[in-house]
Image (cartoon, rainbow, N blue to C red):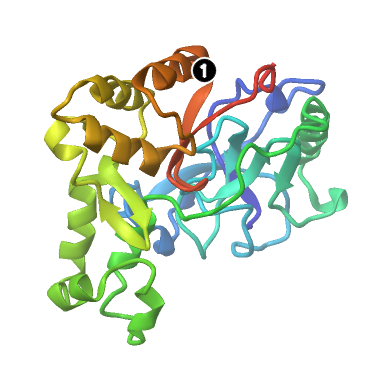
């Protein structure tokens, strides 16, 4: 990670206690590499940032790529970093369950005054989550992955690189047209899932369900178990998007009603709906 964090809201407690963090904001040129990734072309010429440290670095590792980092309720992006190697929004400092992930490299002697207080506040903050274990383990990349990799199909000659991303038929069809392949996934972004390769859910489309990751979509699928016309499709979708194996529609409904306020969907966790254990987020 470079020396700076991107400016954002200062309402999070890591900016306010036990020490008040008062960053000094600057405008830095938007790194050229940000333009190469989805959404990069719309960025302004300069970004509002603040210095966490003073090393002169503009490159380096990051805690995580931006995509999919916080798709479970026990993970959060605390600040996005500024770097000349990854995409806009790559995580500078994040939290996953009881783990604080700090992407900066400098010792306190090279931190800014704001950076020192921010670091101390982050240590105090993560203590609240002591003993918390991650709700999910990384099983897949998130749904932005096929969009960004599609843009590389003409730049990477060894097509085996894409063997778990696209089918051979897709690579042949869109040869010379990487933007077309990326657009194929953008058009149905909310219906992307992974099954050997990234697919668009053609079973959800005819049902009028616009997203495979909303709790409301899961509710509708469960209700379709009592519709003779769509019951078999509903069972297929429940096998695809959950790890439960209830036999009757009533059992599915009881499970949903009991857990609906704690159900979440995770791309990274395998494109599944999962349930937060009772009391975990308290």
Does residue 142 appear left or right of residue 24 in this picture?
left
Q: Quadrant of residue 199?
A: bottom left
From the viewer's perspective, tell me whether residue 266 is left or right of residue 22: left
Residue at 76% over, 43% down: 112
Residue toward you, 61 or 232: 232
Q: Is residue 219 above or below residue 209?
A: above
Q: Position of residue 5 (x, y in %)?
A: 60, 44
Residue 10 location, x and y as percent?
A: 60, 25
Q: Nearer the viewer, residue 150 or 234?
A: 234
Answer few, some or many: residues within 10 Å of disc 1's Cα (few below 14, many 20 plus, some between 14 and 19). Answer: some
Q: Which residue is mark 1?
A: 259
Q: Is residue 11 above or below residue 29?
A: above
Question: Residue pushed farthest bottom?
Answer: 157
Please indicate whether residue 236 sits to the left or right of residue 5 in the image: left
Seen at 62% across and 56% down, the residue is: 62
State the SS at label 1. Answer: helix
Q: Position of residue 97 (x, y in %)?
A: 70, 35
Q: Quadrant of residue 208?
A: top left
Q: Quadrant of the C terminus?
A: top right
């Amino acid at each position: 990670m470079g020396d700076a964090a991107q400016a954002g809201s200062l309402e999070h407690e890591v900016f306010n206690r036990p020490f008040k963090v008062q960053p000094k904001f600057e405008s830095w040129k938007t790194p050229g590499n940000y333009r190469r990734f989805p959404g990069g072309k719309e960025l302004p010429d300069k970004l509002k940032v603040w210095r966490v440290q003073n090393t002169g670095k503009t490159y380096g590792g990051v805690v995580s790529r931006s995509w999919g980092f916080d798709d479970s309720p026990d993970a959060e992006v605390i600040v996005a970093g500024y770097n000349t190697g990854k995409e806009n929004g790559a995580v500078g400092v994040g939290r996953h369950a009881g783990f604080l992930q700090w992407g900066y490299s400098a010792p306190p002697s090279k931190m800014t005054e704001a950076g020192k207080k921010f670091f101390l506040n982050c240590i105090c903050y993560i203590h609240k989550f002591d003993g918390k274990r991650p709700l999910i383990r990384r099983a897949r990349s998130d749904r932005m992955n096929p969009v960004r990799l599609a843009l590389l199909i003409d730049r990477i000659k060894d097509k085996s690189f894409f063997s778990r991303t696209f089918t051979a038929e897709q690579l042949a069809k869109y040869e010379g047209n990487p933007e077309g392949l990326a657009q194929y996934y953008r058009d149905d972004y909310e219906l992307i899932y992974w099954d050997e390769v990234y697919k668009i859910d053609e079973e959800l489309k005819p049902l009028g369900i616009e997203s495979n990751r909303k709790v409301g979509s899961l509710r509708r699928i469960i209700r379709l178990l009592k519709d003779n016309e769509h019951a078999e499709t509903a069972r297929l979708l429940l096998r695809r998007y959950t790890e439960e194996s209830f036999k009757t529609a009533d059992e599915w409904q009881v499970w949903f009603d009991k857990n609906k306020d704690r159900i979440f969907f995770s791309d990274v966790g395998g494109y599944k709906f999962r349930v937060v254990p009772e009391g975990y987020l308290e």
